[in-house]
Amino acid sequence: MSRLSNIVFRVYQRTLHSLALYPTLIALGFFVLCLLVMSIEYQPWLMSLKRDMDVGLVRNAENARLILSTLVGGILSLTVFSFSMVMVVLNNASATLSPRVIPGLISDKGHQKTLGFYLGTILYSLLLITSIEQGNSTQVPSLGVLMALAMGIACLGLFVHFIHSISRSIQVEYILNNLYHTTLKKLAAREAKLANVEDIPSWPDDQHWQEVRAQRNGYFKELNINAINALLSEHDLRMTVMIHHGFFVMSGRPLFKLDRRVDEDIANALLDCFDFFIEEYAHSHYLFGCTQISEIAVKALSPGINDPGTALTAIDLLSVLFSKRLALPDLDFALLDDEPPRLFHYELSLDELLLLVFGPIRNYGRADASVLFGLLQAYKSLFYHPLRAQQKTDLLRHVRSVQESADQFLHNSREREAINQLLERINQTSDLQQPLALLAVPRNSL
């Protein structure tokens, strides 16, 4: 049963992010609608109603066939153009932003629903054409044709909306804003989960627990929480996951630990609950949203793009996300209704997260004073939030990294003075016992 649950879980994860999900479902809905319309089209009660309401109903079989074929040709052209626009957006996003944002753009539900409505209308009209008999003027699906006309008009309205939506999707501000809000929701959801827990459990002492090694290669992205909790409860086990979300796992690497030894069948059943795939979706884990925003900033700092303004916007958004992360512990766990948690896994510490997200921005923008200013401003803002001792130490380490980059790559005296002003404010804000050292400024430039 657990294996079947994991198969369904994996199929659901792949299907949920597929470009064909909503188009397929909507097209099937239109197929069923067409069958329903064809089944009632010539019912006596409907025939009498159509004789009384003559407005908009087609009486001639040739006219009906002409209308439906025209709709099919026109909407097919809209579909081809719309799919072409989607490909243009994906190509533009890959070239100017980051290839990692493409899975999120592909899974955009609004675009999928529009394309699904196009395909559904085409399928509906084609099926309706097959029901029109040649030379039979008494058997004309006038109600179906009227509904097809309404669908065609709706397709025109959706096309206008699609053009408006696709033009926004190309804008970097729109993509950054979507990533920001999606990541913020993931952090808020974890914060809400912890708010319902009276006593947050500590990490168990797993030093002598049994290690179970991975049997597959790939990027660890999802975990079937329901199935794994059921297995742990059934066999009275506790488990700690030794790999972070998004990290690459090689076969043979220790993947998790169990508080007692189990046979191979139970270990394999638990291993089957882990899902590995390449794509990163911001709504899966907040780390993926943060890294995608960071990669957009790094791409903006490349010589081919040369857009430091986008990098500064990304830094500002990331600083807000980090401020939410400060209040969360470095471990996560799966809640159970009537017993303490059995599943524990580490989150990246603040130091690791800053290195992974802000580190590349600092590295690629180390010679750009505005980028270093933005990073120091972000760190200064984080010092205003309640910090644990280790978090304060981590922040200071990364402030010193920016300080070292500025000292090495900024040679303009005015820029060095501005860096010193920010360092002095951080010293005042953080109340350090050993204040941060200021950059040397040549006296002949004062």
Image (cartoon, grey):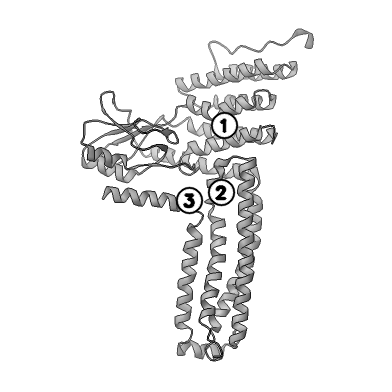
Image-based side of 222 in relation to 410, left or right: left
Of tags 1 and 2, the one toward the viewer is 2
Residue placed under numbered mark 3 in the picture: 17
Q: Amino acid at mark 2?
A: Leu
Name the residue located 55 percent from the left edge and 27 percent from the top edge: 382
Q: Earlier in the sequence, mark 3 or mark 2?
A: 3
Query: Which is more N-terminal, label 1 or label 3?
Result: 3
Q: Is residue 416 left or right of residue 320?
A: right
Q: Residue at x 52, y 26 (%)?
A: 355
Q: Secondary structure at mark 1?
A: helix
In this rendering, the answer to whether 303 lies above or below 438 is: below
Q: Is residue 62 above or below residue 32?
A: below
SS for dot 2: helix
User: What amino acid does circle 1 point to?
Assistant: Ser
Residue on which the image places disc 2:
105
Labelled disc at residue 319: 1
The x and y percentages for residue 425 are 62, 19
Please say if the residues under marks 1 and 2 sit with CB atoms less than 8 Å apart: no
- Vertical relation: 180 (above or below) 167: above
Q: Where does the C terminus fall, quadrant-wise?
A: top right
Residue at 52 percent of width and 39 percent of height = 289
Q: Residue furthest top?
A: 443
Residue type (three-letter) at the residue carrying disc 3: His
User: Neighbour class for label 2 at 10 Å: few (<14), some, many (≥20)?
Assistant: some
